[in-house]
Amino acid sequence: MNQAGKIEETLDADVAICGAGPVGMALAALLARRGVPGARIVLIDGKALGQAIADPRSIALAWGSRLLLEDLGAWPLPATAIHQIHVSRRGHLGRSLMDRAEHDLEALGYVARYGDVVDFLARACERAGVRVLRPLRVSGIDERADGVDLRLDDGRTLHAKIAVQAEGGVFGDQAEKTSTRDYGQTAVIARVSASRPLAHRAFERFTDEGPLALLPQDGADGHQYALVWCVQPERAQRLLDLGEDDFLHELGEAFGERLGRFTKVSPRVAFPLGLNTDPRATARTVAIGNAAQTLHPVAGQGLNLGLRDAAVLAKLLARELTPAAVSQFAAERQQDRGMVIRATDAMARVFADRGPQQALFGLALAALDTVKPARMLLAELMMFGRRG
C-alpha cells in the first residue's frame, strides 16, 4: 500500500473492457462464449451494478440485437415487441409503414428498459466467470509493444493484451473526437400515455425542428410510449418547464391525433444531440459503441450499431489477441459504421438547418411506401445493419 493508502498491485488479463454498459458486457460475454476464459476478461466500470440496473431509460433493440442477446442467454427479458414502424412528415401527406409480416419475423425490434438489459447481460457475464471491477475508474493508459497498462484509481495496474474502450456517455459530456457536429437540437425524453394507443406500433414523426419518436413500451400502467422529442435547445427548456397538461397539449399539436389525446407524462429529462466519431484504433486499443461513434437518436441505431461492433470484435479477438485482430476489426466494421453514421447525420442535418430540402421529405416517404424493395431494404438495414 502506498502513502495515499491505495493498493499497489498488478493484475493481468487478456482483454480489459472499460465500460460495463450493454455494449461492454455483450463483448465480454461473447468473448467467453467464443472460448476466451472468463477469468482472463476484465470489465471495469465507475458505477455500482445496482445503480446501473436502476436506470429507467428506454432503449430500442433491433431484431438483430435480440438474436445476439438470445445467443448469450440474455433473452427473453422484459420488452415490448415492435410489429410496425410508421414514418411520417408533419404537415405533408407522405408516409411509410414497415411491417414485420413483410419480413416473416416475430418483430421488427423491441423496446426495453436500459436497466433490464444491463441486469440480464450482467448475469450472462457472471455465468461466464468474467471478472468485474466496479465501482472503479481508469485514470490512465500506457500502451507498449506487448500490451497495455491501465492505471486504476485505487492504485492498482491492470496489464492486458488488448484494451477496449466501451464507455461513451452522451454527446454533451464527451471530449471532441476527430469528426464532431453539434446539431443544435436537444432530445426531450419521457414516457407518455395516450387515449387510443395502437399496440406494438412505433412512430417516427418528422417535424420542422427534428424527429419525434414514440416507441411502444407496456408497463404497470398499461400501454405507454417511450418519447424521444428532438427540438431546438430553447424550446426543450420550455418543454421541461411546462406543467403536465400544457406539455401534453404541445405534444399533441406536434404529433397529431393518430393516438387520440395524450393523457399522462412521466418526469422529463433532456440532453443535447450531436455527432462525435473516431474510428481509429492503435495497435492494442480499440473503441466500440458510443465510445467510437455517438449518433443522433433518429432511427434508434446507436446501441444496435454498438452491439454489432461487439459481435465482430469478439469473433476476431477470440481467434488471436493481437494487433492484427484490431486492424481487421476496423476494416470489417467500416461499411456498416459508415453507412449508419452518414444516414443518421444526413437526416439530423436536414431538420437542424430547416432548409428547403425538408419539403421533399414527404414525397420521398410516399415513394418509399410504394416501392416495396426500397422499404424492405431500409427495414433490413435498421434490423441488421450493413451485411456482407
Image (cartoon, rainbow, N blue to C red):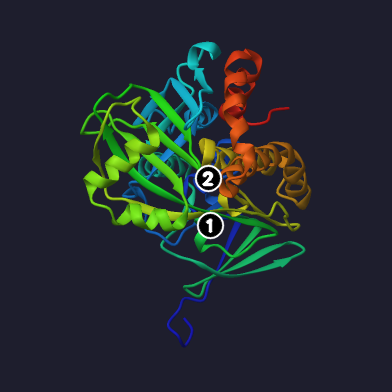
| Kind of residue at badge 1 | Phe
Give the residue drawn at x 33%, y 32%. Answer: 217
Between circles 2 and 1, the one closer to the viewer is 1
Residue indicated by mark 1 = 171
Give the residue drawn at x 51%, y 55%. Answer: 19
Q: In the visual, does 178 lie left or right of 41? A: right
In this rendering, the answer to whether 44 lies above or below 298 is: below
Q: In the visual, does 147 lie left or right of 187? A: right
Location of residue 344 by image quarter: top right
Q: Where residue 77 sits in the image (x, y, percent)?
A: 37, 32
Q: Residue furthest bottom?
A: 3
Regarding residue 345, the answer to whether it shows in the image is yes
Task: Assess disc 2: are there few (<14), some (14-19) or many (≥20) residues with their C-alpha within 10 Å of its C-alpha.
Answer: many
Count the labels in the image: 2
In this rendering, the answer to whether 296 lies above or below 48 is: above
Task: Pick the quarter of the image with the C terminus.
Answer: top right
Q: Where residue 182 sits in the image (x, y, percent)?
A: 58, 57
In this rendering, the answer to whether 157 lies above or below 281 is: below
The residue lying toward the viewer, choosing from 164 and 287, is 287
In this rendering, the answer to whether 163 lies above or below 257 is: below
Q: Where residue 46 sits in the image (x, y, percent)?
A: 44, 62
In terms of secondary structure, where does tag 2 sit? helix
Q: Where residue 174 sits in the image (x, y, percent)?
A: 55, 62
The residue lying toward the viewer, choosing from 254 and 119, is 254
Task: Assess disc 1: are there few (<14), some (14-19) or many (≥20) residues with their C-alpha within 10 Å of its C-alpha.
Answer: many
Location of residue 360 by image quarter: top right
Q: Of the residues under marks 2 and 1, which one precedes in the sequence? A: 2
Residue indicated by mark 2 = 23
| Kind of residue at badge 2 | Val
Q: In the visual, does 342 lie left or right of 233? A: right
Give the residue drawn at x 47%, y 76%. Answer: 7
Regarding residue 123, the answer to whether it shows in the image is no
